[in-house]
Amino acid sequence: ALPMLFFACGSEEEDPTLIGSWTVTAYDEYSGTTCSGTPEWTLDSMSAMFGDDLSLTMDFTADENTMIMSASLSADALCSMMDGTLAGDSCGFSLYGYSANMPLDEVCLEMGGTYANSSCAISDSETRSYSTENDAITFTYAAGTDSAEVETGTWSISGDVLTMSVAGDSSCTNFT
């Protein structure tokens, strides 16, 4: 009888949870609130700008979400972002008819990064509160302030893949 009791008590499948760290493998941001048409930004366009070392992650706790972007740009890629010409650790570029030569460590610092060994490491994060009800999700930026912003959308998890679509006042973003 003991083996029958053991096998009769099967485990119930748990509901999927957002809590944890998710690596973003697809990102499409659209102008407008419908996530349709041609995206203005994608993970590919961001990688073209910030290099192949670009990574996006979404970390969820019980009530907060932190979106983290990190990238590592070579000196050449950093100077190319300004349509400049690399000369040692400086970038020569023209802007509005004026020519300038700027040290790459200053360029990197202006982008919020740290420069070492001819490479600029950039990391940026944004934390917001969130709540869910069934497959609906609501994100709130700057909650409790005059500049609070709300985005709403849907989410689902299939296997170990999170798919989410959220829209605010003027844009819509799909994440995988």
Image: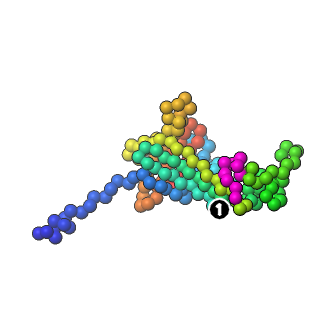
Residue 26 sits in quarter: bottom right
- Is residue 152 something that shows in the picture? no
Q: Is residue 112 left or right of residue 147?
A: right
Which span is picked out in magenta?
108-116
Q: How many numbered marks, from 0 up?
A: 1
Magenta span has 63?
no
Q: In the image as oriented, which residue stretches furthest toward the left?
A: 1
* Label 1 secondary element: loop
Residue 71 sits in quarter: bottom right
Q: Position of residue 37 (x, y in %)?
A: 61, 48
Magenta span has 112?
yes
Q: Is residue 98 left or right of residue 12?
A: right
Q: In the image as oriented, which residue stretches furthest toward the top?
A: 146
Q: Amino acid at mark 1?
A: Asp
Q: Position of residue 155 (x, y in %)?
A: 45, 49
Residue drawn at x 39%, y 52% as measured from the top left: 17
- Is residue 21 something that shows in the picture? yes
Residue drawn at x 38%, y 54% as measured from the top left: 16
Asked which colour scheme the image uses, the reply is rainbow
Residue drawn at x 31%, y 58% as measured from the top left: 13
Q: Which residue is mark 1?
A: 52
